[in-house]
Image (tube, rainbow, N blue to C red):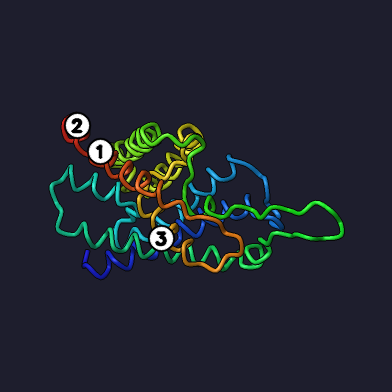
Amino acid sequence: MSNGDIFVGEVIGTAILILFGAGVCAAVTLRYSKARASGWVVIAFGWGFGVLAGAYTAAPLSGGQLNPAVTIGIAVDTGKWDKVWIYLLGQMVGAMLGAVLAYLVYLAQFQANVRQTGTTEGTAEEPTPTLGIFSTIPEIRNPVANLITEIIATMALVLPILAFGLTKGLGESGTLVLIVSLLVVGIGLSLGGPTGYAINPARDLGPRIVHTFLPIPNKGTSDWSYAWIPVVGPLVGGVLAGLVYNVAF
């Protein structure tokens, strides 16, 4: 794979991943969305389908890693670091692009996110929070617990992905990406409750940057004091998964 192919593949694939993922979060969260309040199961499957679409699209160009934690886990196992920076750059650019696209899809809903005050009808409506559409927010803010959650959840992603590579038939049949997508759904359902399961530094950081600059009415804070956890946690989890795989397999 050439450097150009890797970069383009990761940009396109990660953009599709975030378009689906941020899109389903917007669909469930925003007022005036037909899917509003449809729940956590819908979000988990939306992210899983995002992995499915993004990874299959990027696979011919870059292998469809779409996640710095996966890229680093593979590098720790194989010892090949020369192209890691290209993967990471493509993933970050793609994540930011996907967040902008999701915003454009729900542009009217975001513009309707306005606090209604001083009306003659009585009680004013609070604006719908928007950061959770783009990035993760813990249910209980505890940096140690949140970091541990992200490390373990990312290991639960990266270690199976590395092990799946030992099953030759999965790659040859083209079903490997499908299995990984179902794995992401499972992580969301089982391990996503405490922090919203970033398990991907680009998935959280790229959209958080975009959220900071988008002209969303009443968007609230981008919560930069928490932002290091969904970056550091998955990176540590990816490294540990690569080390465990290298030793155990």
The disc at residue 95 is 3
View extreme (front): residue: 118
Q: Give the alpha-carbon distance from disc 1 to disc 2, as whole Å.
A: 9 Å
Residue 52 in the image: x percent, y percent? 45, 51
What amino acid is labelled 2 in the image? Phe
Q: Quadrant of residue 7?
A: bottom left
Along the polypeptide, which appears first: circle 3 or circle 2?
3
The disc at residue 112 is none
In the picture provided, is 71 more to the left or to the right than 123? left
Residue 147 in the image: x percent, y percent? 36, 37
In the picture provided, is 231 more to the left or to the right than 249? right
Q: Are marks 1 and 2 in contact (CB under 8 Å)?
A: yes
Residue 165 in the image: x percent, y percent? 27, 42
The disc at residue 166 is 1
Along the polypeptide, which appears first: circle 3 or circle 1?
3
Give the residue at x 35% y 50%. 201
Classify the position of the C terminus by image quarter. top left
Q: Give the alpha-carbon distance from disc 3 to disc 2, as whole Å.
A: 32 Å
Give the residue at x 69% y 52%. 126
Residue 179 in the image: x percent, y percent? 41, 42
* Secondary structure of the residue carrying numbered label 3: helix
What amino acid is labelled 3 in the image? Ala
Q: Quadrant of residue 230?
A: top left
Q: Is residue 8 above or below residue 81?
A: below
User: Which of label 1 and label 2 is nearer to you?
Assistant: 2
